[in-house]
């Protein structure tokens, strides 16, 4: 790639921000607060989550530099481990993506439900989420698509909402009566508080997700040794700052104790700033942003399944395509069906959050561990201008241990989701050998693209 076409420091900084900033910040603050024993712990877990994201992003950036391939985040499993694990992880990440879509759809329904129902229940919210999925399944099935600017519009909505929420800090008259000092409450460290910290970190991890896609930019950055780590660190520090400001706004306007049980937090802050109309407007904008996100995932993930079928690691049926409408009918139907099934078994955001992050903890820890294998196999690349992280192996070890910790906490507090996740992974690995025995494909996973969308 010519230098003029390569990404600059500014480019990689903006990309890092765009990959991470998602819908989670408008909901997961409630879950993190509910698990926190004090305001200091609450803000501490947001800072720690950002530092873990920096460790992960730099680890994936080096993996991408050492093994530059389209969809590298997933293909490394076949290269560094075994094709059966690659197949299994690919499949559970697809399920994780479906669960993530369902979770974000629930975030939107929690905001819009009070405008439709007088006393909305979890069932009402789940039905609204299912309705959004079904509507856009129908839209995609007919071959219609939103414009290519959908993601840009979504980003503008999110950034505008974040700015509005932060601006509430300039109106001290709106501050909650019990918005005390952050350090005013302290709690002794115990086994229980460590588990609670892990639960809070689970919610924060969902909000910081997306940085793993830095794996795709290792060879496309100008002067990667300097610009890649600087861009990633600057981008995530910017995100940490934004998230801390938004959370401080929640804390000052809503109050720490009230935040623990408040779902539509952004609408409440806007309502206090601009009245009931402001709260309604924020709720509608958030729901529209969620619809755009649902559409993007329904567009991208069926194409992943199609690519996996083309590579022979999913049955041939997933290649079925309506040529007239350019619709992947089987892949689209299966993915949408998984999204709806998730909502039937987990109709609350907290349940989906635990399931999604447990699946992610398997994929994240395993994929990041590939750096140790790639370092040994690609020593000949060390002085060729590729990105090589400093503080190795400390950064990847911190990242892997963090996700192992979160996965363990979920296994302790929600064992049913851990058992389900491990069972599903095991089932897919068994299916790999069944497909291979039947001659349905090879195991090279060539150019399989599986992009984890930001929430």
Image (tube, rainbow, N blue to C red):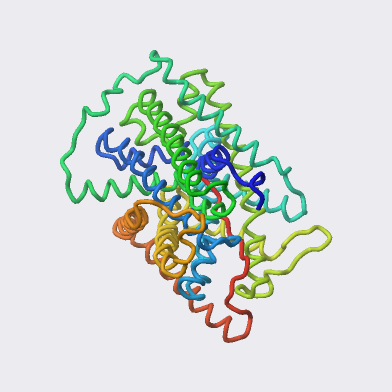
Seen at 73% across and 69% down, the residue is 320
Q: Name the image quarter holding residue 109.
A: top right
Residue at the top extreme, as displayed = 173
What x and y, as percent, mark residue 370? 43, 65
What x and y, as percent, mark residue 289? 60, 38
Seen at 31% across and 31% down, the residue is 257
What x and y, as percent, mark residue 116? 58, 34
Seen at 27% across and 38% down, the residue is 41
In this rendering, the answer to whether 343 lies above or below 4 is: below
Residue at the bottom extreme, as displayed = 437
Judge by depth and name the residue closer to the eye, 27 or 186.
186
What x and y, as percent, mark residue 147? 73, 43
In this rendering, the answer to whether 420 lies above or below 109 is: below
Q: Name the image quarter holding residue 37.
A: top left
How many numbered dots are placed on residues in this image? 0
Specify whether 130 is left or right of 397.
right
């Amino acid at each position: 790639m010519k230098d003029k076409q390569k990404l600059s420091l500014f480019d990689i900084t903006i990309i890092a921000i765009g990959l991470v900033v998602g819908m989670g910040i408008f909901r997961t603050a409630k879950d993190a607060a509910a698990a926190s024993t004090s305001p200091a712990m609450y803000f501490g877990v947001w800072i720690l989550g950002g530092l873990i994201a920096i460790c992960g992003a730099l680890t994936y950036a080096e993996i991408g530099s050492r093994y530059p391939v389209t969809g590298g985040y997933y293909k490394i499993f076949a290269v560094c481990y075994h094709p059966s694990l690659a197949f299994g992880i690919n499949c559970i990440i697809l399920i994780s993506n479906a669960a993530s879509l369902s979770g974000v759809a629930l975030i939107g329904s929690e905001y819009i439900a009070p405008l439709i129902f007088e006393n909305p229940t979890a069932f009402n919210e789940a039905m609204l989420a299912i309705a959004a999925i079904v509507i856009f399944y129908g839209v995609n099935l007919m071959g219609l698509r939103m414009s290519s600017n959908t993601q840009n519009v979504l980003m503008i909505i999110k950034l505008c909402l974040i700015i509005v929420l932060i601006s509430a800090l300039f109106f001290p008259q709106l501050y909650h009566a019990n918005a005390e000092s952050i350090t005013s409450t302290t709690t002794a460290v115990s086994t229980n508080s460590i588990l609670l910290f892990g639960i809070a970190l689970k919610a924060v991890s969902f909000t910081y997700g997306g940085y793993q896609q830095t794996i795709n930019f290792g060879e496309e950055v100008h002067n990667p040794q300097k610009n890649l780590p600087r861009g990633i660190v600057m981008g995530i520090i910017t995100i940490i700052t934004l998230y801390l400001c938004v959370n401080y706004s929640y804390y000052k306007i809503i109050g720490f104790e009230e935040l623990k049980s408040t779902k539509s937090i952004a609408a409440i802050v806007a309502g206090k700033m601009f009245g009931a109309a402001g709260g309604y407007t924020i709720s509608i904008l958030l729901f529209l942003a969620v619809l755009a996100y649902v559409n993007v995932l329904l567009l991208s993930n069926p194409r992943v399944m199609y690519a996996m079928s083309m590579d022979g690691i999913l049955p041939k049926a997933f290649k079925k395509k309506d040529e007239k409408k350019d619709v992947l009918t089987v892949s689209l139907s299966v993915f949408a069906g998984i999204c709806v099934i998730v909502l039937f078994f987990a109709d609350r955001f907290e349940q989906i959050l635990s399931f999604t992050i447990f699946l992610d903890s398997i994929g994240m820890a395993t994929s990041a561990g590939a750096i140790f294998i790639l370092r040994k196999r690609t020593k000949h690349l060390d002085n060729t201008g590729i990105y090589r992280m400093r503080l190795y192996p400390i950064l990847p070890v911190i990242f892997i241990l963090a996700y192992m910790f979160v996965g363990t906490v979920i296994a302790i507090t929600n064992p049913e989701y851990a058992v389900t996740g491990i069972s599903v992974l095991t089932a897919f690995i068994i299916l790999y050998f069944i497909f291979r025995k039947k001659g349905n494909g090879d195991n090279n996973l060539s150019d399989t693209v599986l992009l984890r969308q930001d929430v």
